[in-house]
Amino acid sequence: MNPDGLSGEVFLRATGFIDSENDEIRRVAREICEGASTPEQRAVRLFTFVRDEIRYNAYMISTHPEDFKASTTLGRQQGYCVQKAILFAALGRASGIPTRLVFAKIRNHRLSGRLMREIGTNMLPAHGYNQLYVGERWVSVTPSFERALLSHHTCNVV
C-alpha cells in the first residue's frame, strides 16, 4: 500500500495511452534495465533514456489521441513534456515500478519567441511530469528536457 492508500497495482496497469504491455515498450524497458538490480537503478536508467534519447520538441502538441500513446512517442523518438511523461510512465510500469502522470502549471522564462507568439504567454497550463514509487515513497521526476537543453531551459512551477 502506498501513502495515497491506493494499491501500487493501479500504477502498474497499462492504459490506452500508457501502453506498457506493448511489445516494443517491454523490449526497450528490458534492454534499458538489464543488469539493474534495484527499482532505484531501473528508475535512473529509464529516466536517463527518456530524458536524453527522446528529443524534446515543443511543436509535437497535438489533438490526435494516437500522438499521445507511449509506443508512438518511442517510435518517433521525440515529443513534448506530456508525451515524454507518458512514455516514462509506460517504461516504468513495464519495469515493475509504480509510475503515474502529474501535471503542473509552469512559467517558462526561456520559451522561444516563436512559441511565445503562438500561445501568447510563457505560462504553460499543463506541464507533464511523473512520480514513481521507489524506496517506500513517491519521487517526482521530469524527463522532458534532454541534458543538452538543461543549461538553456529554465521554468518554474507556479
Image (spheres, rainbow, N blue to C red):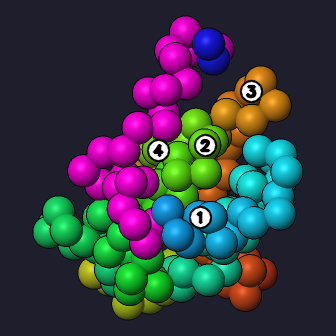
Residue picked out by circle 1: 29
Callout in the foreground (2, 3): 2
Which mark sits nearer the N-terminus, 1 or 2? 1
Residue 77: % across, % down: 46, 85
Q: Residues within 10 Å of mark 2 (few under 14, many from 20)?
A: some
Given the image, on which type of amino acid does mark 2 rest?
Gly
Given the image, on which type of amino acid does mark 1 rest?
Ala
Which mark sits nearer the N-terminus, 1 or 3? 1
In 3D space, how far apart are the residues under numbered discs 1 and 2 (Cα atoms)? 10 Å
Q: Are marks 1 and 3 in contact (CB under 8 Å)?
A: no
In this view, the residue in front, 97 or 102, is 97
Residue 67: % across, % down: 25, 71
**Type of secondary structure dominating the magenta stretch:** loop
The residue at 55%/9% (across/down) is: 5
Callout in the foreground (2, 4): 2
- Range of residues picked out in magenta: 3-25
Q: Name the secondary structure under disc 1.
A: helix
Q: Quadrant of the N terminus?
A: top right
